[in-house]
Image (cartoon, rainbow, N blue to C red):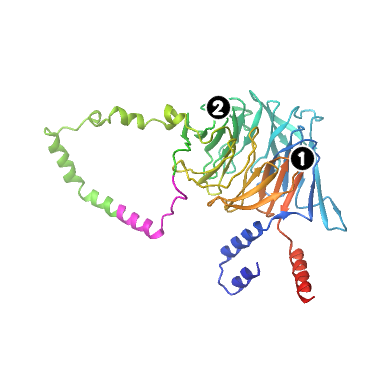
Amino acid sequence: MWKEIGDRERGILRPKSFTTRIKSNRIRTLQISNHKDIVSPHRASINSLQVDLTEGRYLLSGAADASAAVYDVQRATDYEGGGLIAKHKCLFVVDKQHEHGHKYAISSAIWYPVDTGLFITGSHDHHINVWDTNTTQVVMNFKMPGKVYRTAMSSLATTHMLIAAGTEDVQVRLCDIASGAFSHTLSGHRDGVMTVEWSTSSEWVLVTGGCDGAIRFWDIRRAGCFLVLDQSHSQLGRRPTIPEHSATNKALTSKSLSSGQNLNAKPRAQQRKLANGNGTKQSPVGRMPAKGSLRQRLHPGMLSSLDRATAHYGAVTGLKATEDGMYLLSAGSDSRLRLWDVESGCNTLVNFETVRLQAGKPIQLATSQDSALVFVPCMTAVKAFDVWSGNTSQTFRGHYEYVNSCWFSSQEQELYTGGNDKQILVWSPPRMKDLLRIGITGVIDICS
C-alpha cells in the first residue's frame, strides 16, 4: 500500500488507478474480522444475505427457521473486549411468531433496489412476502405454485417493479409490486428453476438456471427465451477488446462507403432494371431464402436442438453477472464453475480449479467490485477465484458446516458469509492500527 501512496504522491499513478489498486490490495488481504462481530438471531441455516444497494449499510439475512433479520453494519449496538470488538445485533427480526410471517424456511431475502423501506422474502411455504421495513408488516403477498428457491429484482429498472421468482415449478413468474399481481410467466424450463439473475446491463433481460441444467436468457417484453447456453459452444478466453484506432478507422470506412453508395445509387438502380429485362420491380417473394435458411432465422429458444442444450450436467445452482454485464458466472450440481460470454453465448473455457459444491440447494455467489474475483461457497469454505484465469486467489475457512451464501460489500470492502452453522461471519481487510502494530512488532523482533 505504501508503494501505491508514494507513486500517487509523485504523480505516477492517476487517481482512478490508485483507487482501483488500493481496493484490489485490500480485497486480497481479507481475513476473518477481529474487530466486528454480527450476532445472529437465527436458529437454523442461513440461506441468503444481501447488503442494501442504496446506502450500503443494512445487511438482510434469511434463514431456514423462517426468520429474516436486518443489521446495521456501520453502527455497532454494543462493544466488547474494552471497546475493541464491535457487536452488531439485529435491528429487528420477523419469524414464525409474526402474524403474517413465513411458516417454513426462507430461501431468499432481498432488498428493494432503490429504497430500504421495503424488502422481499421467498419461502418454502409457497409464498413471497413484501415487507415494510419501518412497520415490519407484510404489505403484499404472492402465492406461488411451489417452493420458492430464489427471488431477484433489477437494480437498473426504471419502468417496472418486477420480482422474478424461481420455484420448483417449471415456469418463471414475474410478480408486479405496482399492481400486486403476476405480470406474466416465462415457459421453457423442463424442471424447477433454482436460480434467477437480472442482467446488469439491461433492465429487460432476465437469466434463469434450472434443475434441467439449462441457462436461459429472456427479454421480458417478448415471448420465449432468446438464448439458451450450450456448454459445447465455446470460445477460448475473453473476447478481445476493439482498439480505439480500429473503431475510428471502421467508422471512417463505413462513412466513406455509405457516401459512395449514395453517389452511385442511381446507376445501381438502372442496372437492376436492366437485369429484370422488362424494367418491372422484382417481387420480394423471389428473394425469399430457402427453407433451411428460414429455420435458422427462427427464435433460438424455439428450435428443439438449441432448446435442449445444457450448461451443466445437473442442476444450475448459482448465477452471477459481472458488473459490466458482458459475462455470466454459473455454478452447477456437477461441481463445475463456468464463465460465459453473454454476447456470443459461448463457454469461455476458463478452467476453474477443482471445487466441491453443494448439489441439493441453491448457492449464492458474489463478485468483487471490479468483477476480478468471484466468491464461491465450497462446502465448509468460501473460495475466491480469479475470474479470468480460474486460479484460486484465497480460501476462507471459519464455518463449521456448509456455507450457503456470501455477499461482498463494495462500500465497506467486506465479505459476509452465512452457513448451516447458523453464523454470519465478517471477512475484512486489516485495519491501519493492526498494520502499524504488526510493523512495530516486526521491527522489535529484528532489533532483538
Amino acid carrying mark 2 in the image: Thr
Q: Which mark is residue 421?
A: 1
Q: Which residues are magenta?
A: 235-254
Q: Position of residue 7 (x, y in %)?
A: 59, 71
Q: Residue at x 54, y 32 (%)?
A: 213
CA neighbours of label 1 inside 10 A, class few (<14), some (14 to 19), many (20+): some
Q: Secondary structure at mark 1?
A: loop
Q: Residue at x 65, y 33 (%)?
A: 361
Q: Position of residue 176 (x, y in %)?
A: 61, 31
Q: Across the whole image, how many numbered discs are drawn on residues?
A: 2
Residue 251 colored in magenta in the image: yes
Q: Is residue 56 visible?
A: no
Q: Position of residue 33 (x, y in %)?
A: 76, 54
308 or 283, which is in the foreground?
A: 308
Q: Is residue 153 visible?
A: yes
Q: Which mark is residue 99?
A: none
Q: Which mark is residue 185?
A: 2
Q: Residue at x 56, y 69 (%)?
A: 13
From the viewer's perspective, is the residue at label 1 or at label 2 nearer?
1
Amino acid carrying mark 1 in the image: Asp
- Side of 194 relative to 225 (left or right): right
331 or 38, which is in the foreground?
A: 331
Q: Tell me where residue 357 sits by quadrant.
A: top right
List the single residue furthest toward the top: 145
